[in-house]
Image: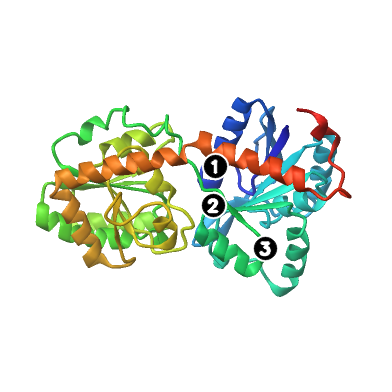
């Protein structure tokens, strides 16, 4: 089968959707399928056998963060010859209604079109204006199959675009996120290491974590907070705040490569993810669980779809510094509880291995191809095994 995986986001900037697509590509190739990734590109990037770059990517405010997408209005002149040349069996668009690349591919495609919806916050879709919605609904109807990564994501998108959605979650690379890796040597000094992983943005709840940590360090003393994530305008404020208070036990690790990230999880005694909301899925939680680490996280829908309070994690109300501190102290002072939660999380994470998730996606492709309307002929490539 010949498959196109379409990303609205620049592949030069790692993120949940980009990592999701890369994992599917890897697993589909293992299955023997031919796969191409279509995505916008940063300045100077070029296409290769794996990646077809279409459109210049620009930083665009999105859902409290910054997304690197293309807004090139003439993108159709680049998309059309690619689709005519490649003759894909299935075109799988991730966030299929994000302009301009995904909507253009969807509009011009004659293949079986599958869309995966990852987000659950309309503020990230600043282009959803009444006039634009008319076009989006038209393109939405071109989707032969619709996937949501979680129940919260399905509820969000179906509120704007009613239809049938199949939930297929994000996956985790169980070989990469494995407890077999060594921890970071300089943090192996007997302190309780609390590790945060993610962009240092307001919506990730870092300010609440810093507030909670003030009580944690007072109660247990022998601890350290390690913040792993790329620098943002918010992170600079957090660093100034920490420096002003003279806290030497808070480490800003900055951007960490995907290769080194498992070592930071392995360094953690507790992984904390205090996001305030707008998370459709708990990928950070899943990575921590795969590493066998106990978790303290906000009790928001996206996180609750992955972890269960009292089983793999302690879940607390978002934006509640007092309860966040209590949960961290409870785990920090109970080694047995940390071990038990970590062990249960590792067992659960096994259900989310990318091999299993990719097979579910492949089975969905086959069902879509089988059910496709007979008056919509399959492309010539679909005759291949």
- Horizontal and vertical percent position of residue 76: 81, 49
- Looking at the image, is mark 2 or mark 3 nearer the viewer? 3
Check contact, mark 1 vs mark 3: CB within 8 A: no
Give the class, few, some or many, for how many residues have Cα within 10 Å of label 3's Cα (few <14, many ≥20).
Answer: few
Give the class, few, some or many, for how many residues have Cα within 10 Å of label 1's Cα (few <14, many ≥20).
Answer: some
| Residue at figure coordinates x 80%, y 47% from the top left | 109
- Looking at the image, is mark 1 or mark 3 nearer the viewer? 3
- Horizontal and vertical percent position of residue 285: 38, 48
| Colouring used for the render | rainbow
> Which of marks 3 and 2 precedes in the sequence?
2
| Residue at figure coordinates x 55%, y 64% from the top left | 155
3D distance between C-alphas at marks 2 and 1 = 10 Å
Residue 138 vs residue 251, the one in the foreground: 138
| Residue that label 3 marks | 163
SS class, disc 2 = loop
| Residue that label 2 marks | 149
- Looking at the image, is mark 2 or mark 1 nearer the viewer? 2
- Horizontal and vertical percent position of residue 124: 56, 63
- Horizontal and vertical percent position of residue 242: 24, 56
Check contact, mark 2 vs mark 1: CB within 8 A: yes
3D distance between C-alphas at marks 1 and 3 = 23 Å
Q: Which mark is residue 20?
A: 1
């Amino acid at each position: 089968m010949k498959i196109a995986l379409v990303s609205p986001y620049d592949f030069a900037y790692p993120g949940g959707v980009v990592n999701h697509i890369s994992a599917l590509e890897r697993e589909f190739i293992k299955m023997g399928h031919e796969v191409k990734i279509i995505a916008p590109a940063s300045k100077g990037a070029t296409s290769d056998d794996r990646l077809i770059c279409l459109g210049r990517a620009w930083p665009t405010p999105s859902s409290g963060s910054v997304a690197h997408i293309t807004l090139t209005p003439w993108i159709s002149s680049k998309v059309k010859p690619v689709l005519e040349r490649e003759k894909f069996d299935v075109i799988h668009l991730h966030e299929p209604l994000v302009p301009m690349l995904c909507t253009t591919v969807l509009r011009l495609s004659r293949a079986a079109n599958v869309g995966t919806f990852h987000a659950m916050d309309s503020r990230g879709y600043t282009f959803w204006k009444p006039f634009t919605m008319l076009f989006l609904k038209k393109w939405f109807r071109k989707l032969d199959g619709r996937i949501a990564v979680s129940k919260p994501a399905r509820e969000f998108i179906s509120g704007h675009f009613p239809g049938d959605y199949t939930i297929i979650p994000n996956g985790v690379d169980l070989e990469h996120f494995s407890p077999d890796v060594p921890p970071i040597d300089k943090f192996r000094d007997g302190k309780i290491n609390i590790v945060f992983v993610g962009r240092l943005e307001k919506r990730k709840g870092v300010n609440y974590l810093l507030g909670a940590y003030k009580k944690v360090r007072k109660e247990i003393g022998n601890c350290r907070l390690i913040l792993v994530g790329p620098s943002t305008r918010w992170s600079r404020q957090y660093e100034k705040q920490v420096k002003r208070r003279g806290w030497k036990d808070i480490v800003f690790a900055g951007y960490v490569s995907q290769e080194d990230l498992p070592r930071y999880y392995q360094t953690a005694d507790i992984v904390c993810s205090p996001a305030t909301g707008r998370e459709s899925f708990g990928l950070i939680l899943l990575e921590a669980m795969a590493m066998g680490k106990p978790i303290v996280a906000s009790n928001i829908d996206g996180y609750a779809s992955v972890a269960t309070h009292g089983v793999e994690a302690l879940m607390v109300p978002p934006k509640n510094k007092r309860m966040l501190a209590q949960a961290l102290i409870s785990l920090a002072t109970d080694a047995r509880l940390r071990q038990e939660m970590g062990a249960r999380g590792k067992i659960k994470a096994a259900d989310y291995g990318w091999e299993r998730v990719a097979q579910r996606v492949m089975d969905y492709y086959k069902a879509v191809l089988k059910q496709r309307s007979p008056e919509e002929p399959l492309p010539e490539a679909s005759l291949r095994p």
